[in-house]
Amino acid sequence: MSLRDQQPGVASFTVENIGGITSTNVDVEPGVTVLVGENATNRTSFLQAIMAGMGSDQASLKADVDQGRVEMTLGGEDYERTLETAGEAVQYDGDGYLDDPTVAELFAFLHEANEARLAVSRGADLHELIMRPIDVEEIKEEIERLREEKGSINDKLATIESRKRDLPELEERRDTIEAEIESKREELAELEETIDESSNDIEESQRVKAEFEDALEELRSVRSELETVRRDIETQQESISSLRSERSERETELSELPAPESDDTELAEKIETLRNRRQSLNGEISDLQSLISYNQERLEEGDYELLGDVEDDTRAQNGNVTDQLLEDANEEVVCWTCGSRVQRDQIEETVTSLEDLREQKVQTLNDVNDELDEYETRRREIERTRQRRDEIERELEEIETEIERRQERISTLKDSREELTEEIERLETTVDEFEDADFEEILTLHREANQLEFDIDRLESTLEDVTDEIAEIESMIEEGEELRERRERLGEQLTDARTRIEQIEKEAVEAFNDHMDAILDILEYENLDRIWIDRTTESVRQGRETVDRTVFELHVVRTTDNDVAYDDTIDHLSESERKVTGLVFALAGYLVHDLHEDVPFMLLDSLEAIDAERIARLIDYFAEYAEYLVVALLPEDAQAVDDDYRRLTSI
């Protein structure tokens, strides 16, 4: 169920010692909320508090305290986050609204230092940003799992089709056996009628007849047992042949597997080193981002002017200390990190250098991730090969054991066959003796009847086997229909998994282009016809290989006064146009990753580079996609915003 279906209602915040806020309680209603105020009025600080309540670790503590907290009530649930200094860093604790705020930090919390928002003006890798939340390795593993399952189903269906071709012959054989059984039963009935008519009342005849029938019955029984033993021997021999064939296949597969790694310690050490490097880089990037955000916030809110309060509190004790720190507030400030007096633009240049350093760290992190993926893939391949080798060796041992067991069984059966053959010879001699007596005619009839009964029993046994085989094939055919349906579903899932990344890429490009066209129409920038993304591929080095990867190329189209269109570059866009383009790119990511369903808040800050009328139109446009849209504006920019939107002027 989407957030809009849940109707979470008013979101309440209790904030202590976040940014520049000492303590405040604020309610945010669904829809648009405009935070109106000059710089240093805690607008950005309250946006940080919302981010903290949602689960982000990008909020900062008030400069003069060691602890802070945010309580948020949303949709009848309470969430609390605490912040506490831990050495040079800030430690976060408690449960926020989101289990993982990473995607929201990229595409929903659009403060001044937001990475997606700045990506356009910095020429960053737009494709990497959009695809960063996607676990590509998990998709690849899903594809492999689906492919293996589909292959297994194909093997089963091939077996079923092969057995299905045997069905007409088996049905014909069943009909033939049934007809033969019926014919022999009729013949037996006639023979028994003849025997009854030929019987005499002589007592001796009856005795001899009974003995003869007993001998014939025993002979029939032993012959039946011998036939069973022979069939069992044939079955065991066929099984051994099949097992030997299977053993040969496994031995061939085993010989084709790569030689086992004698020691993968070095590979494990490389992976561990790269993981440590990645963790270190993530920490460095996070620290840099916190430092950049902190300094930008101080620059934006003019926090250095708070030194005037320090002057009032310390003048009585230290004379004119602040006179030595602040001589000209318009040109020089006291650096809040080192305490020295510097030009404001020096701090701004330092912040820019930190941003460049962060970009370098991000690129290094991407390279480390690529190399780590390569080594981890190699280790998984080695492990799969090792597991398959162990599995084959285990199967070979089982096959060898089974062959030996069946050979022992054949030996036992052959001994039984020899004993039964000798017993049959003995019984046949006994029957022959009866035939030499004076009852040759009646004995011949009984012998023929006995043979018919034996034949009928054998045919019925064969019929039972054929019928069972037919039933088995028919059951397999029924299962085949289910397997085909399953294979079709797997095919759809495979197609979906294989095209999922491409689909996200296409949706991102389409979303950006559509919203960019719509917003340019709304904002009416002079001679700016179109800004759009083209999805292309390029060849790059990845580890030791050259691979093709997708890139998003940003294009700008302008027109001259004579209405002639020409291609331009992002560098020639005005600051306002770049800001708008960055916001639209973030909106595309917001929609592609379905944040409108899971993240109730979208935050907008630092829109001063855009004129007031265009800001108002942007807010109207963005309001369609977020449950709560919270925007920080200067008073002069807020005047153009729709009067129906709620305004907060005091935090």
Image (cartoon, rainbow, N blue to C red):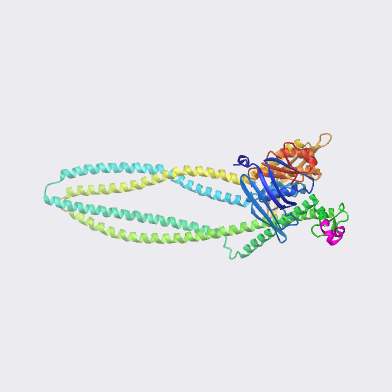
510, 600: nearer the viewer? 600
Q: In this view, does 615 lie above or below 58?
A: above
486, 616: nearer the viewer? 616
Q: Is residue 213 magenta?
A: no
Q: Which residue is drawn at 43% across and 55% down?
A: 242
Q: Is residue 13 left or right of residue 336?
A: left
The answer to which quarter of the image holds residue 351 is bottom right
Q: In this view, does 117 lie above or below 66?
A: above
Q: Is residue 119 left or right of residue 5?
A: right
- Kindly give the residue lying farthest to the right in the view shown: 327
Q: In the image, which residues are magenta?
A: 311-324
Residue 544 seen: no
Q: Residue at x 40, y 55 (%)?
A: 238
**Rendered location of residue 412, percent (x, y):** 34, 61
- Kindly give the residue lying farthest to the front in the view shown: 316
Q: Which residue is drawn at 32% across and 48% down?
A: 461
**Rendered location of residue 376, percent (x, y):** 62, 58
374, 105: nearer the viewer? 105
Give the main secondary structure of the magenta stretch: helix
Q: Is residue 323 magenta?
A: yes
**Tally of numbered tags:** 0
291, 69: nearer the viewer? 69
**Rendered location of residue 3, percent (x, y):** 62, 42
- Image quarter (top left, top right, bottom left or bottom right) of the N terminus: top right
Q: Residue at x 12, y 52 (%)?
A: 204
**Rendered location of residue 378, percent (x, y):** 61, 58
Residue 423 seen: yes
Q: In this view, does 260 lie to the left or right of 130?
A: left
- Kindly give the residue lying farthest to the top in the view shown: 562
The answer to which quarter of the image holds residue 408 is bottom left
